[in-house]
Amino acid sequence: MQKHISFDEIARMEQLYRSTFVNSLSGFKSICLIGTKSKSGKSNLAIFNSLIHIGANPPYIGFVSRPNSEERHTVSNILDTGYYTINHIHQDIYEKAHQTSARYNADESEFKETGLKEEYLNNFYAPFVNESKIKLGVKFKEAIPIKVNNTTLIIGEITDVFFPNNCFCDDGFLDIEKAGTITGSGLDSYHTTRRLNRLSYAKPLKLTESIPLNYIQNLSNE
Amino acid sequence: MQKHISFDEIARMEQLYRSTFVNSLSGFKSICLIGTKSKSGKSNLAIFNSLIHIGANPPYIGFVSRPNSEERHTVSNILDTGYYTINHIHQDIYEKAHQTSARYNADESEFKETGLKEEYLNNFYAPFVNESKIKLGVKFKEAIPIKVNNTTLIIGEITDVFFPNNCFCDDGFLDIEKAGTITGSGLDSYHTTRRLNRLSYAKPLKLTESIPLNYIQNLSNE
């Protein structure tokens, strides 16, 4: 049996109920921890569920920021300093990652409060999450206002990528499932994944094929 | 062991290799089929991996469109007619969904070519995917240019939601995993999910708790 809910019914929902419902509709979300440091040197860490691929060349990544107090520190640090980190979340840290969304006082760092470890790599200004397996250093590029609801699309350029050696395939594919990256749904649901397949580039009148995962052995570090 | 790849190394990658790599970095993606119909009545169906929640009140959803020929029909139909559908993808249809990305001639409908069934619900102008379990009717709201790489964020208002009766919880949460919605990574990898937990609203100095899934029994239809 199929249920139908209309725009008017959504409009009449109680606020938290509506937020829970509508946040379920956009499918599985990319969740991450964004690390920043203020000009005065105070670190900040916040979970986001709106990460989005913007482009590969140059490598651009985006996220949507809502005008609320928890996320404001992240965005003001990004605008002030120009740098931030994006850290994938895995099964062992998702509860601590979720906990970063609590309304801590401005003089408390979420690293200290949650026990996640601050890490500085490659002289990058913003802190990475030590426990995270896939970490991106990102340089702020543009803040695009989304006027219809006063949110902002923050776009940055990926300057550094750190990942486990054994997850890299010979065609450039990074196996984030092998690295343990998890996904989210709604506002508060966390999920591991299991690969069905990689499918070859689709062509008319031709059945798509599986792409084998050829992990690069003995990957050298620079 | 941890591997580091820099911006300069990304810039030197061969184009498809780079696209495969950078598309892996943004985590698990929300994948969906977007259904449209031209003013002359020709239907179109295309897979997108950039769906994003924009807001709950009003209910806004977005996706990023790249300036290539396959996606152009979707966007031009949206701009011409004002309406489109967003259809979740599950395990039984993901190969057909992937196949919609082939470069079919302009006079061929991807519904016909892939065998997915066109469905019209509630007098909505654009076609839904019959096989899909969670389906959204969406009214175009705004096209926001992302100037750094000539892409566009398309934002629409959710006017209709269709979903299976047994997936709806009493706090507004829609269990998309129970409905079979899958997720994607990179350009071509498809994954089922398994829930770790739903976590309660985070508060300072308080451990977060599990939220039980209380499915609504005997949900009435309107």
Image: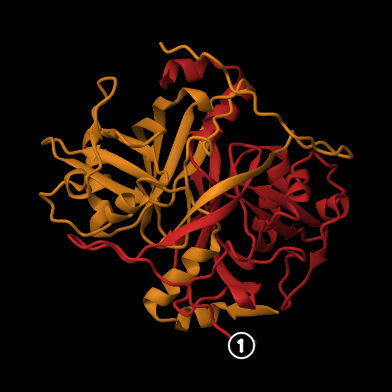
Chain colours: A red, B orange
Q: Please, is residue B80 above or below residue B47 in the view?
A: above
Res. B164 image quadrant: top left
- Residue A57: x and y in percent read 43, 71
**Residue drawn 60% across the image and 46% down it:** B194
* Residue A64 appears in view: no
- Residue A44: x and y in percent read 77, 54
**Residue drawn 21% across the image and 63% down it:** A206
Q: Please, is residue A176 above or below residue B206 in the view?
A: below
* Residue B65 appears in view: yes
Name the one closer to the observer, B19 or B151. B19
- Residue A108: x and y in percent read 87, 49
- Residue A110: x and y in percent read 82, 51
Circle 1 Cα neighbour tier, 10 Å, few/some/many (<14 / 14–19 / ≥20): few
Tell me the residue that label 1 is attached to. Answer: A218
Type of residue at label 1? Asn
Chain for numbered disc 1 = A
Q: Secondary structure at mark 1?
A: loop
